């Protein structure tokens, strides 16, 4: 039997210990949103960190049971406190995340972070060895695992291993700053397939490989590039990720619209400096200064989910963001009008859909983003086709959706303020035309299309080829290796 083994740094459900009791929580973010929709009720084993340093039997069991309830087969890997600090927060989120999103100034190139990165990649390689069998397919996700295939191969394991990067790949000018740049590329070239969201990401990757790695030959660039390296072929493709269109569309039809005498501007983001939240508030403030006729006629609802990354940049971002919210509300607000409604938590799914369905404008302002699923979720939920998507030109989604959105450069505060006015005043016909086109595109290129296209290029398989998750899947089968 050929099984699918999926690897991501953190499982879709992680455990938090609060006052001595264990709590299973859904992990935030786009990777989980997208993969959940592909893997739900599939007999695919999902391997990742379970959220706590220690993995007692009770914790493993809690994760397994919580996963099974949601339709997943989860296999938690333990990380020590030191590994959480140096691999997770240090190398992955303190070097790769900022650099790949053009925030070079936030990088701390500490050698101990690199050591931890190698160690944890090795740890996952041993886990893959233990839990997979010959003929299984290994699908690895994101920037935490550039070296994983190298270590798997070193253990003498010869499985098909494919990789998808959920974040952008930087230009050579940025990538070359990494002290361990050659090792990272050589590690990546051990995958059988490497997937990116956009053609620009793939171009940047190929340019870096071309410059830095000896003995590579880039054989073709279209439609799936092939590289020859150390006597083998590596495929490099572009697979723009998407959402479960039907889920959002169906849910929106079940939920009542939020009615208001004011126009609704809606933003949904994780607390992250890459999402352009500060620039968004500055542009909104400028809009209110320039166009006083909109006072008391708009609501700007911005929901910000807390970030699990423990780094000082996130603390200062929160402080600056909240300062700006109170500055705007203090400057323009009155007893009967709050210009910014700030929701400092993860919104419940039904509330999210309700606002997507009701918003006049949905605003994605990323400084840099691999894809960004929010705009796609908004369009799928906007069943009346009356909303407008204002989308940063630096989100991967812009390369796909640019014709039917209002594009903004988040650094251009003045123009963004004007574009917000334009979005609010767009004629109904134009709004309908844009939204109809967006919805058709996202319906066709949905999450199943993404999953199937990737799995086909990687393993010659479709999602349907992997069997459904059986009700009584035996626990001991999964944990026999531990
Ligand atoms: P993220 O950076 O997490 O994902 P994004 O694609 O926008 O970014 O996904 C965020 C997800 O979390 C969406 O499903 C959204 O609805 C949800 N979410 C965010 N804030 C929320 C809130 N306050 N309340 C409720 N839900 C919230 C990474 C990359 C992206 C890429 C995805 C998938 O950074 O560029 O699109 O992976 O590959």
Image: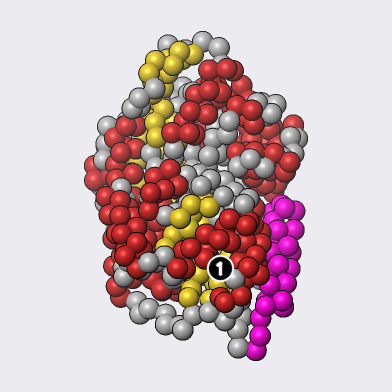
- Tell which of 171 and 436 is nearer to you: 436
- Tell which of 76 and 186 is nearer to you: 186
Asked if the magenta segment contains residue 36, the reply would be no
Residue 251 x, y percent position in the rendering: 32, 69
Q: Could you tell me which secondary element the residue under label 1 belongs to? A: strand
- What residue do we see at 55% from left, 72% from top? 300
- What residue do we see at 44% from left, 16% from top? 218
Task: State the quadrant of the N terminus.
Answer: top left
Q: Which residue is mark 1?
A: 303
**Residue 219 visible somewhere in the drawing:** yes
- What residue do we see at 41% from left, 52% from top? 34
Place residue 235 in its image quadrant.
top left
* Badge 1: residue crowd in 10 Å (few <14, some 14–19, many ≥20): many
Tag count: 1
Q: Is mark 1 within 8 Å of ligand 1?
A: yes
**Residue 275 visible somewhere in the drawing:** no
- What residue do we see at 34% from left, 37% from top? 454
Query: Is 442 left, or right, of 291 in this rendering?
Result: left
């Amino acid at each position: 039997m050929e099984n699918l083994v999926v690897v991501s740094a953190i499982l879709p459900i992680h455990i938090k210990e609060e006052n001595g009791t264990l709590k299973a929580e859904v992990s935030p973010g786009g990777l989980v949103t997208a993969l959940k929709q592909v893997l739900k009720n599939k007999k695919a084993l999902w391997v990742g960190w379970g959220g706590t340093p220690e993995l007692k039997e009770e914790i493993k069991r809690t994760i397994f049971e919580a996963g099974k309830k949601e339709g997943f087969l989860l296999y938690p890997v333990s990380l020590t406190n030191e590994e959480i600090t140096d691999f997770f927060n240090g190398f992955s989120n303190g070097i790769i995340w900022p650099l790949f999103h053009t925030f070079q100034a936030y990088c701390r190139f500490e050698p101990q972070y690199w050591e931890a990165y190698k160690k944890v990649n090795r740890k996952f390689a041993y886990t893959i060895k233990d839990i997979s069998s010959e003929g299984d397919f290994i699908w690895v996700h994101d920037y935490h695992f550039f070296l994983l295939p190298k270590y798997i191969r070193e253990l003498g394991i010869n499985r098909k291993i494919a990789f998808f990067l959920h974040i952008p790949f930087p230009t050579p000018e940025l990538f070359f700053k990494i002290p361990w740049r050659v090792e990272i590329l050589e590690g990546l070239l051990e995958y059988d397939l490497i997937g990116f969201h956009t053609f620009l990401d793939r171009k940047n990757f190929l340019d870096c490989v071309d410059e830095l790695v000896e003995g590579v030959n880039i054989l073709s660039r279209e439609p799936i590039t092939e590289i020859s390296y150390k006597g083998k072929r590596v495929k490099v493709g572009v697979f723009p990720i998407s959402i479960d269109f039907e889920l959002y569309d169906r849910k929106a039809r079940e939920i009542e619209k939020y009615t208001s005498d004011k126009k609704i501007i809606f933003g949904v983001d994780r607390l992250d400096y890459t999402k352009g939240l500060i620039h968004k508030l500055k542009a909104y403030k400028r809009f209110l200064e320039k166009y006083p006729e909109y006072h008391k006629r708009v609501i700007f609802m911005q929901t910000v989910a807390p970030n699990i990354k423990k780094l000082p940049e996130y603390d200062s971002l929160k402080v600056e963001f909240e300062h700006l919210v109170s500055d705007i509300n203090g400057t323009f607000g009155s007893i009967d009008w709050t210009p910014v409604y700030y929701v400092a938590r993860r919104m419940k799914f039904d509330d999210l859909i309700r606002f997507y369905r009701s918003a006049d404008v949905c605003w994605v302002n990323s400084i840099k983003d691999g894809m960004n699923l929010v705009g796609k979720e908004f369009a799928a939920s906007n069943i009346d086709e009356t909303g407008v998507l204002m989308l940063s030109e630096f989100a991967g989604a812009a390369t796909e959706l640019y014709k039917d959105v209002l594009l903004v450069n988040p650094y251009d505060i003045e123009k963004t303020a004007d574009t917000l006015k334009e979005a609010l005043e767009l004629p109904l016909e134009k709004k309908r035309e844009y939204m109809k086109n967006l919805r058709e595109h996202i319906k066709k290129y949905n999450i199943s299309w993404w999953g199937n296209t990737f799995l086909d290029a990687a393993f010659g398989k479709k999602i349907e080829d992997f069997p459904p998750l059986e009700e009584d899947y035996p626990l001991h089968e999964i944990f026999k290796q531990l």
